[in-house]
Every structure is written in C-alpha cells, then in structure tokens.
C-alpha cells in the first residue's frame, strides 16, 4: 500500500501498528523527502536504514529494486508529494491523502490523470459540513475517472495534535485519535484484505494504547 499526498505520515504509521496488532508481519518504507515517519521511531543511529520498533520494521530510502526481496505480509510505503509513477505501479493499493485546499486538488487532479492508475482518495481536515465535503469530491471527480474509493476524515483537534507532535519526537501511542480516524484505519485494513470486523476493531484499539502483538 503506497501513501502519497499532502499529509500521509501519521495515517501510514497508525495503519502499520494496527496491522501488526492484527497479526501481520509489517514493514514501513519511508521514501519521502523529509523522512518524518522514520524520525518517529527511536533509531539509535541516524545513519541506519532499517530499524524495528513495536514489532514493525521501519526502513528509510529503500530502492524500489529491492522491494521484491522483502518478506512481509504488509508493506506500507510512505512517499512524498509527487512519487515516481513506477514506484506507485509496484503498489497494489495507492492512497492519495489530501486536504481541501483547491491548489492541492488541482495539482493532484493533473498528477492522477498523468499516472493513469486507480487510486483511493483520503480527504482529510474538512469541517464537519457534509455538503462541503461533497462539493470538494464533485470538484475533484469532475475530470478524474481513476478514483476507486473515497475515504473521509473530518477535522479533529486530537488528530491534528498527534500529526504535528510526531514531527518532533517518538510516537508509539495515539490513544485519543478521533472516531473518524479509527474508521479510516479499519477501512485501510479491509482494503488489505482483513475482513474480520472484530479483528480490525481489536487491532485498532490495541494499537491506540501502544500494545504489541506477540510474534
């Protein structure tokens, strides 16, 4: 599953911990320019490219030529704002994370048309005005026929606090994320073929509290 767009790092990390608590062997590859996600785990050396934290392997700057060598049930890739199309093509699921800013929507409208691959769009940070969310969706879908699915995440102060906090230190627990964020995580898990709802609910609950599935 490849994440790209404006603000995907926190969602990618939460999904990784939830998948681990669902009993999956998980790897996260941070191939973004800023490396925010890799900086959220306590790597003892900044030069390390692989580090295990909470039974999830985090990797930094791993070439796509090596992805086929990775032995995991779930590989989540954190891209930057404009990933290479070939990298996206190697992902079985592609998730664009964006806010409602029109300039971002215009940019990704063009980008998605250029790459010509099916994607899921995770729209985050909108006010709890469903009519506005529908208006944004209609605007983005106007010329774009490559959208497989919409995931909607309304603005919540707790989610935003965690998103900012992870840029400045270690993050392993996110007990107070919004109900909307929990729904998003369960939807992402379902997209990765974890269909047992009870399993998804328990995995997200345990991940929120910083618990680790025994391996």
Image (cartoon, grey):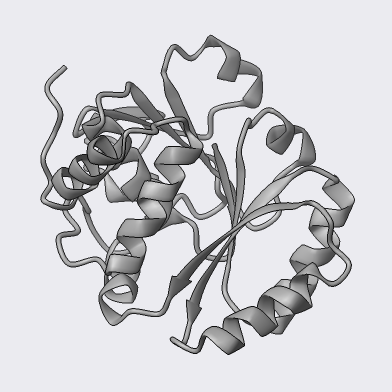
> Is residue 60 visible in the rendered structure shown here?
yes
- Answer left or right for 196 relative to 87: left
Please name the residue shown 14% across and 44% down the image. Answer: 206
**On the rendered image, what quadrant is the C terminus found in?**
top left
Image x and y of residue 50, in percent: 37, 27
Please name the residue shown 35% across and 67% down the image. Answer: 180
Q: Is residue 68 above or below residue 79?
A: above
The picture quadrant where one finds residue 66 is: top right
> Is residue 37 visible in the rendered structure shown here?
no
Image x and y of residue 174, in percent: 19, 58
Please name the residue shown 78% across and 40% down the image. Answer: 85
Image x and y of residue 199, in percent: 24, 35
The picture quadrant where one finds residue 46 is: top left
The picture quadrant where one finds residue 90 is: top right
Please name the residue shown 74% across and 44% down the image. Answer: 118
- Answer left or right for 63 relative to 169: right
- Answer left or right for 114 relative to 176: right
**On the rendered image, what quadrant is the N terminus found in?**
top right
Image x and y of residue 131, in percent: 59, 88
Number of dots carrying numbers: 0
């Amino acid at each position: 599953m490849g994440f790209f767009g404006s603000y995907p790092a926190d969602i990618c990390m939460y999904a990784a911990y939830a998948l681990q608590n669902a009993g999956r062997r998980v790897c996260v590859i941070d191939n973004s320019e800023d490396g925010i996600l890799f900086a959220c785990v306590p790597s003892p050396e900044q030069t390390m490219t692989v580090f295990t934290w909470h039974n999830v392997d985090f990797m930094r700057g791993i070439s796509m030529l090596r992805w086929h060598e990775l032995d995991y049930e779930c590989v989540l890739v954190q891209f930057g704002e404009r990933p290479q199309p070939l990298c996206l093509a190697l992902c079985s699921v592609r998730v664009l994370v964006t806010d409602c800013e029109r300039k971002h929507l215009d940019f990704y409208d063009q980008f998605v048309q250029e790459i010509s691959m099916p994607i899921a769009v995770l729209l985050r940070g909108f006010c709890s005005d469903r009519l506005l969310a529908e208006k944004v969706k209609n605007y983005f879908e106007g010329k774009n026929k490559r959208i497989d699915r919409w995931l909607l995440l309304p603005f919540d102060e707790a989610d935003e606090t965690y998103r900012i906090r992870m840029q400045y230190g270690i993050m392993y627990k996110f007990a107070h994320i919004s109900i909307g964020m929990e729904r998003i995580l369960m939807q992402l898990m379902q997209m990765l073929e974890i269909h047992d709802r009870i399993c998804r609910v328990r995995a997200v609950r345990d991940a929120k509290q910083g618990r680790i599935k025994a391996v």
